[in-house]
Image: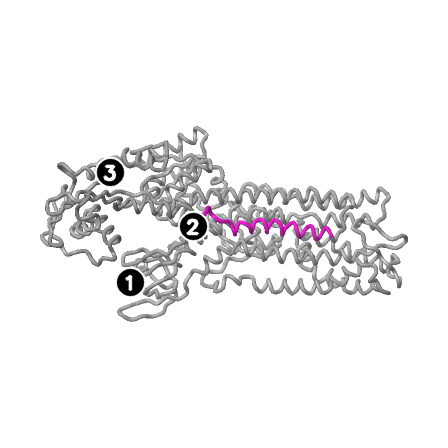
Amino acid sequence: MTIEPAPPVTVTDLTVGGMTCAACVRRVEKKLARLEGVTATVNLATGRARVSHPPHLRPEELVATVEQAGYTAALPAPPRKRERPAEEGSEDVRRERARLLVTALLAVPVLVLSMVPAWQFRNWQWLCFVLAAPVAVWSARPFHLRALRGLRHSTATMDTLVSLGVVASFSWSAYALFLGGAGAPGMRMPFSLLPSAPDGVAHLYLEAAVGVPLFVLAGRFLEARARRGTGAALRSLARLAVREVSVRDGGTERLVAAEELTVGQVFVVRPGERIATDGEVVEGNSAVDLSLVTGESEPVEAGPGSAVVGGAVNAGGLLLVRATAVGADTQLARITRLVTEAQAGKARAQRLADAVAGVFVPVVLALAVTVLGFWLGAGADPQAAITACVAVLVVACPCALGLATPTALMAATGRGAQLGVLVRGPQALEGLQHIDTVVLDKTGTLTSGHMSVIRVTAVPGGLGAEAVLRLAGAVEQGSEHPLGRAVVAYARRTLSGQGPLPDVRDFHAEAGRGVRGRAGGRVVEVLAPEGELPTELTDALRAAEAAAHTPVLVRVDGAAEALIEVGDVLRPGSYRAVDRLRRLGVHPVLATGDREAPARAVAAALGIEEVHARRTPEDKGDLVRRLRERGRRVAVVGDGVNDAAALAGADLGIAMGTGTDVAIGAADVTLVRGDIEALPDAVRLARRTLGTIRVNLLWAFGYNVVTVPLAMVGLLNPMVAAVAMSVSSLLVVGNSLRLRAWQPAPARGRQRVARRDQEGRTR
């Protein structure tokens, strides 16, 4: 059997204008889907469409298709043209604000005179008519235009309902004034929340004709501001990009545009400046603030050989950095790209809401006509029938349905990015909510991934731990062995206040045994433990072997002075992360390619009961498959190439940000800081987000289920209906905005764990 390769697919993003409700989203998606081989996902909150299409379809054809549906469309501007991302659409904002202010100035007198009979002077109704006319025509013009555009394409949207409501209210009021006796001098009209009319005089509904545009415009203006708030995190990431960078070339400096920087060039980062791109420090020492890039709360020390991230702030001295990645390959670009992709997707609940919204407006139109016919058929006053009909048109709100999910996703993915958790899409959030088992790699995930000194045990009455460590570090400076480098690094860090390590003479390294040399006037040997040792060192040796760490013995002038325990240390956050996962109902499993003893030691320290050691990448994949066959919802956390298969085969793949590109590419979630403690925070954020979406959808559906019947039976005034409709959308967006303030668990206990660890290292 021949398997034909899948046809190539191109993904194009479009900026779509003119969408106001979920029905618009449905309409654009259906229009694009009529093109052969095209699928589209449209996001109301971002105003973006992500279109997958065959390569032969040009973007211009996609734009034309969207325009045929009655909306505007364009390709997003290149990054360098977005000089001020925070002000995108500012001209539209100013125009809408002006429209709202003029509408309020004209509408408020009409509302006051219509609702307060005591203020109704002679011929007040004609003044109200003059003020209401520009509101019904000019202020409501966007609704009328979009309704007519929809009519030309045989579709109906939220704007259709608003337009019909305004036209019906104003037309009836004009009829009442000119033909129904309401224009007589001295006419008084009481205000009622229920459909009614004074005896013998046709009722005016000018308050509805101006109130509906006023409250809908106000609601959409506030809603748009709130929606821009949900995308604030993404805009803050965009602001981290540096525009110009000072490049050092042949001893001279010159300013170049950041996008012109190439890999290998050396650039200058002065104190307080942002680092232009990912690179490696070649000269200088400083502290780098990564809080806006990875969420790391504490500044990180950077010196020659240290890797630094573009967008971070140089909080200390001057640095010379060699660029290692530029443009779309930088970590900041990857973070921005992942957040954008996450916000472009749709959760399952949103697809249901969009499907409902697709038929919502036609159903409401049918209900409005039915209500009008029923009231007239039942012998009710025509103006009461029209009031009920207009109330049905105005109160129905598919906007809340369309905003329920995307606003929550925008706020959550943006907040996650600020905290160092990158979620690839809504499906990943849903997966995070439901996981009950997490398979953890050991090296680089629960541990630091490199050799470190864990403990120095000195003989009582001897030279002391610090003196012995200083001598051992000095001798090991000539060694290339990982154990030796770990001892040197620890000695320099711990004894930094005591000056440089002593010079060494007569250095000699013996393969498989250790090193020796003369330092500080003494003969120092750092070698594998052998022979009889003092009781304290014997106990330390047993403890190191039980923990599967490597012990090295330090002899000074032939006497055993100390035992240094070296190993791959647990990350401080691993203890708390595993404990918090367990309390969240997630069962931890350790799967590693390392030996049984180190794996068991790490599991015992963290309280992990299920351990799988000496596992190949294929074994890890089989383990994940068996767990899933037992009904478990499995997440895999890893950082290496050997974890990529398991990451891809799990219900949810989670990569450490310090890991390989292969692992990150196969993952659904990336922990940018490489801190496992961010995982329980990610689970909690996902659960809070999905809970917020459920509340939003419950409100959106419940609001329409309650208010539409009330309007049908005549228990809602059209103006009150307009207020209710606007408030419903604002409540949904406001509820989503609460996610921007979501905080991870407080860091209590972190300092305690770190302090306990440090005290245990040197004694």
Could you say which quadrant of the image residue 143 lies in?
A: bottom right
Could you say which quadrant of the image residue 619 lies in?
A: top left
Could you say which quadrant of the image residue 15 lies in?
A: bottom right
What's the amino acid at mark 1? Gly
Q: Position of residue 121 (x, y in %)?
A: 85, 64
Above or below, 556 relative to 264? above
Label placed on residue 422: none
Q: Name the residue under label 2.
A: 420
The residue closer to the viewer here, 547 or 534, is 534
Most prominent secondary structure in the magenta stretch?
helix
Q: How far apart are marks 2 and 3 (CA)?
A: 35 Å
Q: Name the residue under label 1.
A: 284
| Secondary structure category for the residue under label 2 | loop
Q: Where is residue 597 in the image (x, y as percent from the top left)?
A: 27, 34
Q: Can residue 354 be seen in this view?
A: no
What's the amino acid at mark 2? Gly
Left or right of 181, for residue 481: left
Q: Mark 3 points at which residue?
A: 544
Where does the magenta region start and end?
Answer: 720-747
Q: Sequence order check: which comes first, mark 3 or mark 1?
A: 1
What's the amino acid at mark 3? Ala
Q: Sequence order check: which comes first, mark 2 or mark 3?
A: 2
- Residue 221 falls inside the magenta stretch: no
